[in-house]
Amino acid sequence: MTTVDDASRPSRVAGPDEAISAEELQLAARNHGIPLEALRYDVTPAGLHYLLIHYDIPDVDPAAYALSVSGALDRPLRLDLAALRDRPRVTHRVTLECAGNGRALLRPRPVSQPWLVEAVGNAEWTGTPLAPLLREAGLSGDAVDVVFTGADHGVERGVEQDYQRALPVADALREEVLLAYEMNGAPLLPQHGAPLRLIVPGWYGMAHVKWLRDITVTTEPFDGYQNAVAYRLRRDADDPGVPVTRIEPRALVRPPGFPDFMSRTRVLRPGPCTLDGRAWSGHAPVTSVEVTTDGGGTWAPAVLDEPSGGEWAWRRWSVTWTATPGRYVLGARATDASGRTQPVEQPWNRGGFANNLVQRVEVVVPAQ
Ligand SMILES: Nc1nc2c(c(=O)[nH]1)N[C@H]1C(S)=C(S)[C@@H](COP(=O)(O)O)O[C@H]1N2
Ligand SMILES: [Mo]
């Protein structure tokens, strides 16, 4: 186990035949994914939304809570929950995805939270927009970064820290960025950041700081651990890499039929059926989804439903298929308006981030 004095422990890539360890299992048991059948819901019920918590869920007393806003601005603020709730109120439906989604499918496997494809959810977040608050506080013209600090504390590769992430000031001022106090119309649950979290539509999960207690505007680039060390796309340990930011396009299949208990291979009766799922991208709206039943050999276009819930929410897609006896590997591929799509080769990087390789859903259609 990592200890505070074990300061040099690097992130690790598993050996060629190295199985998932008890440490990875321990993380996976704490940080659950969405059960893929829950792709049926437009809005993911709170308890079925994925979870990622680096340290412990902190004990924050909502009655004593106040958000501090300070740094490079004229009028530092302290806002309790009542003051935050008195401000303009907005709801956005937002697809949240962990940057590590797909990590455990990479070869070789970067050792960390071992997600397959299930680190995603699409919830309604209600709160107050951040930009007007920063402007009212007299944001300085030479502001560079806005640093968001959570109330949770831990140690990561030997570095003791509060969970902290910065956004460049231009990104923090985008009108869709929210200080959210409700999820799906109810106060935030402890595991999702109660009483207040940041929501940065379009960005991978690490930017959406939970248990938010402090906002500090800086005039120098922030070089904290989660920005400068952790969430970077690197080829190798010496590569400074580039920051992980927006969500790459992805489509997932809602698993058809019923599962085998151990393998979760799907069993589907022969005959006509509808295959469907969800597609999203944090760069630009999804413009098309294609579906394969032969593991990527051939592709057929899917029908995209009208967007439901605004530009930051996933979209349903569907296609009709006549299942005949045999074995199949289903998958779907999303393309967005920026031209980004899902690769056929794994996009490997040392941290195992942004792996949007097409999903493989094994299906058996038995003879009647
Ligand atoms: N304070 C704090 N915020 C955090 C985290 C954390 O560990 N601490 N995890 C981040 C990561 S990596 C992800 S993917 C999302 C997950 O949000 P959710 O658990 O509500 O789905 O929260 C982000 N915000
Ligand atoms: Mo994450």
Image: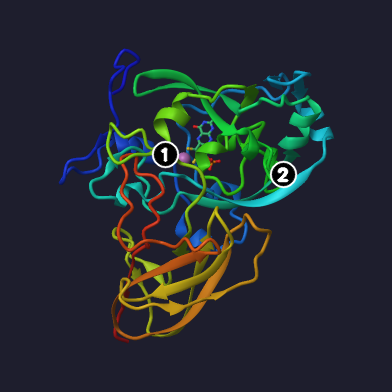
Where residue 211 appears, x then y in whole percent? 60, 29
Task: Give the farthest residue toward the top.
Answer: 5
For the point 33% across and 52% down, the residue is: 347
Relative to residue 232, is residue 366 drawn left or right?
left
In the figure, residue 168 lies in which quadrant?
Answer: top right
Residue wearing tag 2: 175
- Residue 134: percent from the left, percent from the top? 74, 30
Within 10 Å of disc 1 (Cα), the crowding (few <14, some 14-19, many 20+) is few
Residue 212 in percent (x, y) is at 62, 28
Horizontally, residue 308 falls left or right of residue 36, namely right
Label 1: state its secondary structure. strand
Image quadrant of residue 219? top right
Q: Position of residue 198 (x, y in %)?
A: 63, 36
Closer mark to the observer between disc 2 and disc 1: 1
State the mark number for residue 242.
Answer: 1
Q: As shown in the figure, which amino acid type bears the numbered disc 2?
A: Glu
| Amino acid residing under circle 1 | Val
What's the residue at 78%, 25% (across, down)?
137
Quadrant (top left, top right, bottom left, bottom right) of the C terminus: bottom left
- Please say if 303 is above or below 241: below
Q: Earlier in the sequence, mark 2 or mark 1?
A: 2
